[in-house]
Every structure is written in C-alpha cells, then in structure tokens.
Amino acid sequence: MEHVDENKEVVNRLINEFVNEGDEAVADELLAQDYVRYDPDAPSGAQGPEEFKEMIQMFGEAFPDAEVTIEEMIGEGDLVVFRGTETGTHEGDFMGHEPTGQTFEISGLAMHRVEDGEITQTWANWDMLGMMQQLGVVPMPDDLIEMTE
C-alpha cells in the first residue's frame, strides 16, 4: 500500500478544510502548481489551481452553507476516489440567477491523483442539472413532476 492512507488524508483535508471551510491556505498546500481539474461544469473543460479556488469561492458566495460529505472513499496506488453528497441553500447570485432561498442535495463522484502529498489531477462529476432543477432555475420535465406528485 504505497501511501494510500496518506493520499486519502490529503483528499479528506482538501474537501473538509478547503471546500467546506474555505481555507485557501490548505488549497495552496495541497494542490500542485500544475494541478488540472477535469469537470464537465468547469469552464473549457479543465481548470488550474487558481481557477478551482475561484470556483469554490464563487460557489461559497452563492451557497454559504454548502457542504460536501464524503460517503465512501477508495484508494489505490496514487488514485483516491470518493462518492459524496453536497447540500446547500441558494443565498447569493449563481451563474446569473438571483437567490431563490431553495435548498439542494446532489450526489457526485471525484477521482484525485495524489503525488508526493499534492493533488495533481481531479476528475469530477456532480449532478449540477439536478441542483439547478431543485433550485427552480431549470424546469423539471413534466413526467418527473407527475412522478413526484
């Protein structure tokens, strides 16, 4: 087990101390200078460390109570994968949408490559369409509305 437990702790710290608590010093410590995030919701499909920090800051302004909960985590070699849940309340402007006061709960998956204690790459996919539907800024398909009534 080559550093698997240490790599899991790096990812845990990134989520809990930076994403949830907003400690940018932790992001500076844990994200490699050449870090790249591959995310269908990221501008141009990939982001560097500064763009990722800006995205988290913007998200925190729109959803000040947002929190990612790691449900399960698996590590092998230099890869750490987690399945998580994110919750929050829409209290600030988000992607041109005024605050709705609505809450959301979505699921997501993220895989991180950790090398020498730093995250060098992330592949992430979160249910942003589901979030936008829960906030009421994207309409639900009629057949789904009927199923929930």
Image: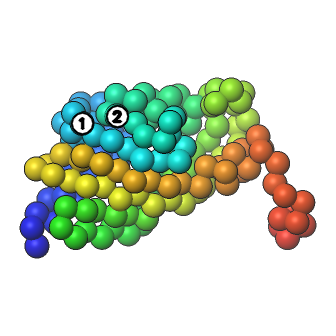
Identify the image's colour scheme: rainbow, by chain, secondary structure or one colour. Answer: rainbow
Let me know if residue 7 appears in the view.
Answer: yes
* Residue at x 43% of width, y 65% of height: 83
Mark 2: which secondary structure? loop
Q: Which mark is residue 48?
A: 2
* Residue at x 61% of width, y 49% of height: 128
The image shows residue 26 at horizontal and vertical percentages of: 24, 37
Of callouts 2 and 1, which one flags the residue occurring earlier in the amino acid sequence?
1
- Labels 2 and 1 touching (C-beta < 8 A): yes
The image shows residue 41 at horizontal and vertical percentages of: 54, 43
Let me know if residue 9 appears in the view.
Answer: no
Residue designated by label 1: 34
In screen coordinates, is 60 left or right of 51?
right
Say above or below: 40 vs 70. above
The image shows residue 112 at horizontal and vertical percentages of: 30, 55
**Rendering quarter of residue 62:** top right
Crowd band around label 2 with a 10 angstrom C-alpha radius: few (<14), some (14–19), many (20+): some
Say above or below: 48 vs 116. above
Say above or below: 83 vs 56. below
Give whichever of 110, 35 is nearer the camera. 35
Mark 1: which secondary structure? strand
